[in-house]
Image (spheres, coloured by chain):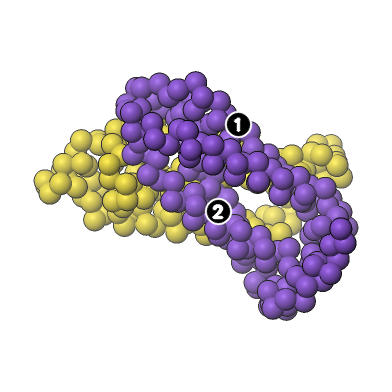
Amino acid sequence: MNVHPYLDALHDSWLGHIMRDVPWLFPTCEGLHFVGMSLLLGTIGVIDLRVLGFFKGLPIGPLHRMLPLAFFGFALNVATGVGFVCSDPDSYWIVGAFRLKMVLIMLAGLNALWFWLVVLKHVDEWGPDADASRLAKVISAISLLFWVGVVTAGRFIAFSGTGTL
Amino acid sequence: MLEALQNTAFSQWLLVSEWGYPILLTLHSLGLAMLVGTIVMIDLRVLGVARSIPLLPIKRLMTIVWTAFAVNATSGTLLFAADAVKFAHSPTFQLKLSSIVIGTVLAAMMSKSVLDHTSTFEAAEAGAAAPTKLQSPPVAKALAALSIFIWIAAIGLGRYMAYE
């Protein structure tokens, strides 16, 4: 498949133009991308750690109601992330760390879907000091691993490729 | 002294190493995500979001906050050492450090005034008189809002340092 026409289209989109032409926009989006990352990783990380057995005094059900914060962080990061890619699609596309990050985000998303389908209905059963199920712990451990991987791959993007990212 | 710091063998190695610098930056990013993410959750709870979460066990999340703080103080010091003269003279870095100091003081205040006295604060949330000013919900909420603002500013300033 030849992706270059699509990469060119992203490059020439209005988003690509403003990301390159408005000097303060890219750094501002970088800041927002890190704020989004904190909301996403912080919320999901705390929930995963609780499911795994840390801070057992916290009931999982109410804690789980903080999840909209993670979705907000994710939306913020999709929006700013698409902006980064549009600013210079070719440079991102060739970087292994970028591709790995996209794959890891998809895997983390599928894992979250698994959590949603099989674990979510039980969260209100797990009050203070209650143990989550074995399956929930496995899914949470995988979740932590994937999201840490996403952040790590993301950090390495700037250190690979042409050095312009 | 700053020059001596950035001329140490470690600093010299860090600047040119293929893995050292990105790995430290990754640790710094993971630390900031856990630090700020957890603080924002605590602050939002104090602000009245997800009030079904009991405050008493929330106190234990401060363990994550202080652990992440230690990770970032360490990784941050090492990253600073790599380019000490430039960072020390950067107004953005000075502002970032000031934000972190204020944010840390706010977190310690919140921990002492609200999280150490959760039943008092929960009673005050329900309408009882608060024994101290810091434990009255309006004051605690103002500090929580300020804390969220300060930590977002610290992140923004940290990112902006890469563009100076």
Q: Position of residue A74 (x, y in %)?
A: 55, 53
- Is disc 1 placed on a helix, strand or loop? helix
The residue shown at (45%, 33%) is A119
Report whether B22 appears left or right of A26: right
C-alpha gap between disc 1 and disc 2? 18 Å
Q: Can the viewer see residue B76?
A: no
Residue furthest left in the image: B128
Q: Is residue B51 above or below residue A76?
A: above
Callout 1–callout 2 Cβ contact below 8 Å = no
> Which residue in the protein does label 1 denote?
A142
Report whether A154 appears left or right of A138: right
Q: Is residue B86 above or below residue B53?
A: below
The residue shown at (59%, 57%) is A77
Amino acid of disc 1 = Ile
Which shade of the palette goes to chain A? purple
Q: Position of residue B90 (x, y in %)?
A: 67, 61
Callout 2: few (<14), some (14-19), or many (20+) C-alpha neighbours within 10 Å? some
Q: Quadrant of the N terminus of chain A?
A: bottom right
Mark number, residue A74: 2
Residue toward you, B146 or B90? B146
Q: Position of residue A21 (x, y in %)?
A: 73, 78
- Is disc 2 placed on a helix, strand or loop? helix
